[in-house]
């Protein structure tokens, strides 16, 4: 019985290690606290909700390699037509840091996403709490 459990454990661990290397890792970071009443920023990958980020939060996602569309908004479970959408090319084994922020404009305000480098992300991460989805 112990041998069977040992073999099962080795297979389970090797499969999880293999899966991590075949996907890219994407961090979504929300470091701003404005607007306080707006609630969570809803983050989408390819039109599917992957996270709801409140103030000072981040989330981590394993994403299959290839082209993906990233977007965010404040309300709704589907991205709106006028939502800012960014195309990202995800590579296996690489880590991407995407900051979600509120952009103030003269006539309108909108939620934006932008990729930041690892050094900038490492400065932000200690002040943020992880959201487990």
Image: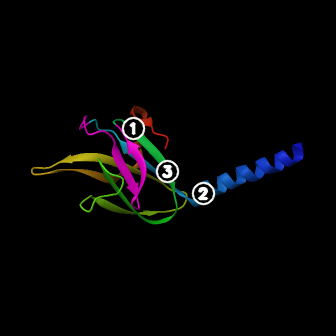
Say above or below: 18 vs 133. below
Magenta span covers which residues?
A: 34-54
User: Alpha-carbon distance for marks 3 and 2?
Assistant: 13 Å
Mark 3, secondary structure of its residue? strand
The residue wearing badge 3 is 61
* Spot occupied by residue 46 in the image (x, y as percentages of width and height): 41, 62
Compare marks 1 and 2 and give the one earlier in the sequence. Answer: 2
User: Alpha-carbon distance for marks 1 and 2?
Assistant: 25 Å
Q: Is residue 44 magenta?
A: yes
The residue wearing badge 1 is 57
Q: Residues within 10 Å of mark 2 (few under 14, many from 20)?
A: some
Rendered image: mark on residue 21: 2
- Residues 117 and 115: in front is 115
Report the side of 82 relative to 99 (left or right). Answer: left
**Residue at horizontal 88%, vertical 46%?**
3
* Spot occupied by residue 90 in the image (x, y as percentages of width and height): 46, 62
**Residue at horizontal 32%, vertical 52%?**
72
**Residue at horizontal 32%, vertical 51%?**
76
Quadrant that contains the N terminus: top right
Report the side of 128 relative to 85 (left or right). Answer: right
Q: Do residues under tags 1 and 2 come within 8 Å of each other at their CB atoms?
A: no
* Spot occupied by residue 100 in the image (x, y as percentages of width and height): 32, 47
Mark 1, secondary structure of its residue? strand
Return the residue found at the far top. Answer: 127
Say above or below: 101 vs 80. above
């Amino acid at each position: 019985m112990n041998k069977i459990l040992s073999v099962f454990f080795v297979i389970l661990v090797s499969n999880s290690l293999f899966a991590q290397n075949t996907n890219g890792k994407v961090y979504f970071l929300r470091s701003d606290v404005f607007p306080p009443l707006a609630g969570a920023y809803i983050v989408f990958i390819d039109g599917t909700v992957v996270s709801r980020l409140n103030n000072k939060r981040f989330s981590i996602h394993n994403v299959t390699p290839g082209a993906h569309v990233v977007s965010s908004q404040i309300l709704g479970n589907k991205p709106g037509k006028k939502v800012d959408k960014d195309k990202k090319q995800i590579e296996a084994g690489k880590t991407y840091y995407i900051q979600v922020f509120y952009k103030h404009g003269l006539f309108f305000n909108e939620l934006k996403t932008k990729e930041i480098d690892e050094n900038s992300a490492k400065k932000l991460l200690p002040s943020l709490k992880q959201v487990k989805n």
